[in-house]
Image (cartoon, rainbow, N blue to C red):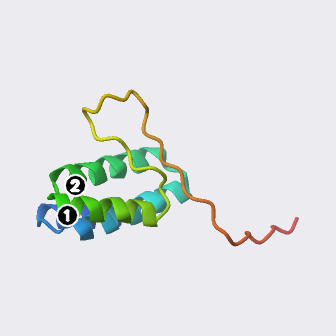
Amino acid sequence: MACGQLGILAAEQGNFDKAGYWFARSIVGFLLMGDRHEVERNVSNFLTAHRKAPPEKKEELQAIWAEVGLGPFPEPKGSNTNRKRSVKPRKKSSPRPRRKN
């Protein structure tokens, strides 16, 4: 949870690129742990930072989102789409080691 808290602090200070970094890191971590509630909380925080950011920082935040492999950037609230937000981690290119039984 510390990464998400650092993201909140950074966003409150107007450091939207740093906030995006910390939120993205938190989202990926919670995805790997399977904690859907924390994923959704941090996605919401990321999108709030994106909404409050100036236009040039919005582009940086979208680049951070893409860089960590979270899929298509979610539609902003109030858009005319009824699609549900979906965040899925990207598949890693290196295979995982097999477990020994």
Furthest residue in direction right, as rendered: 101
| Picture quadrant where residue 62 is located | bottom left
Please state, as top left, top right, bottom left or bottom right, where the C terminus lies in the image. bottom right
**Image label count:** 2
Tell me if 76 is positioned left or right of 71 in this view. Answer: left
* Residue indicated by mark 1: 56
Q: Position of residue 86 (x, y in %)?
A: 47, 42
* Residue indicated by mark 2: 49
Element carrying mark 1 = helix
Residue that appears at 67% across and 69% down: 93
**Viewer-nearest of labels 1 and 2?**
1
> Neighbour class for label 2 at 10 Å: few (<14), some, many (≥20)?
many
Frontmost residue, 3 versus 13: 13
Q: Position of residue 26 (x, y in %)?
A: 40, 62
User: Tag 1: residue type?
Assistant: Glu
Q: Residue 91, labelled with which disc?
A: none
